[in-house]
Amino acid sequence: MSTLRPALLTDHYELTMVSAALKDGTADRRCVFEVFTRRLPSGRRYGVVGGTARLIEMIRDFRFDEAEIDFLRRTGVVDEAAAAWLADYRFTGDIDGYAEGELFFPGSPILTVSGGFAECVVLETLALSVLNHDSAVAAAAARMVTAARGRALIEMGSRRAHEESAVAAARAAYLAGFRFTSNLAAGARYGIPTAGTAAHAFTLLHDDERAAFASQVATLGKDTTLLVDTYDISQGIRNAIAVAGPELRAVRIDSGDLAVIAQQSRELLDSLGATETKIIVSGDLDEYSIAALAAEPVDMYGAGTAVVTGSGAPTAGLVYKLVEVEGRPVVKRSEHKATIGGRKVAVRRHKPTGTATEEIIVPQGVPDRQPNDRMLQRSYVVDGEPVALPTLDQSREHLRECLISIPWEGLKLSAGDPAVPVTVVPAS
């Protein structure tokens, strides 16, 4: 378990602003910050909100202890006034946002943080760290789930990530529709079903492959998965069935031309009477290689590096920007980084059939509701108190329904326009 506390995720420049704002009297000005992205990663047609529940729990526990404050004072990060303020810090504002598992697009106000300037600004790095990571993994995982066409996926990327990121990635992948994770910490913390096989090292440990398989079956029974590509795959399959019999649950293949090998392995298993033995493939799979295996006799995919690193997009590109001060909209005019002032309200517009057609964003106003509109924001924190959060399984189901609602073109892996166009209605 990592010893890093949420408060230490605060960035130096955030505390610089807090110190200055406390000194000039602006620290308590009522402000609104929004989290959004200006653009989706290249080739993506939608984003997936991930990590919101984790973030709200971390904000609930966001405190500066004596040792942390002493470090900040000793190193000159804060002055005495700011140190005293941090000692009493409790977030007392409001947080609203899109449901975890919701799809988002450029400009979508996926999180809105309201309160005094200082109490909101110290949450910027924490919010972006959690949401950028989990949303990136969830979006990549959702694309893999779509490519798998109903076949199961297991997340197995812990060895390619920081130890805490690995647990968060397993959660985000499960949110997106993965069925299992190999990460036991994620299983214990979030109730995600776990699964896994022995590694090549176990086979190499034994005098021969049959001895390794016999040991695994003797310990776990025939309802296990044997890794058959340590030496020769065809012989590995023969050895697996010779040891376990045709009732063996599954074999796993982790190398080679998986399209060809999967077909050959299915034929060999069937010829040995193991018609119900499943084939699991792994080995640097991403959404594209999974899609390429759609016509092959594969029963489950194991994804590792690609899913925990966002499959080429390790961040969702989310930013945390001040949009309102004391009810007055404020805007940033920097080239290519301009913002739209004012607190936003968003709805997703649908056909009567349920297909999403447009996302409407209204700054400083109320959208003109139509019969099939769905409001996108919900309350997460009210006056500093978290409200009841959906369970991970409820958020997982929400994402599944969202993916069903977008036009089929939006599920393509090829580059294209966002799955749902976004319209910003001018403030009245």
Image: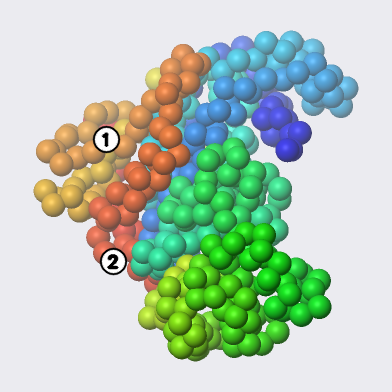
SS at mark 1 in the image: strand
Quarter of the N terminus within the rendering: top right
* Way the structure is coloured: rainbow
Label 1 crowding class (10 Å Cα cut-off): few <14, some 14-19, many 20+? some
Quarter of the C terminus within the rendering: top left
Q: Where is residue 274 in the image (x, y as percent from the top left)?
A: 47, 78
Q: Which mark is residue 257?
A: none
Q: Where is residue 402 in the image (x, y as percent from the top left)?
A: 31, 49
SS at mark 2 in the image: helix
Q: Quadrant of residue 126?
A: top right
Label 2 crowding class (10 Å Cα cut-off): few <14, some 14-19, many 20+? some
Q: In this view, does 171 lie above or below 416?
A: above
Q: In which quarter of the image is residue 58?
A: top right
Judging by the rendered image, the residue that carries numbered circle 1 is 375
Q: Which of marks 1 and 2 is nearer the N terminus?
A: 1
Front residue of 256/320: it is 256
Residue 26 visible here:
no
The residue drawn where x is 49% and y is 85% is: 272
Is 91 on the left-hand or right-hand side of 356? right
Distance of mark 1 from mark 2, alpha carbons?
23 Å
The residue drawn where x is 76% and y is 80% is: 208
Judging by the rendered image, the residue that carries numbered circle 2 is 409
Type of amino acid at the residue the image marks with label 1: Met
The residue drawn where x is 50% and y is 34% is: 53
Type of amino acid at the residue the image marks with label 2: Glu
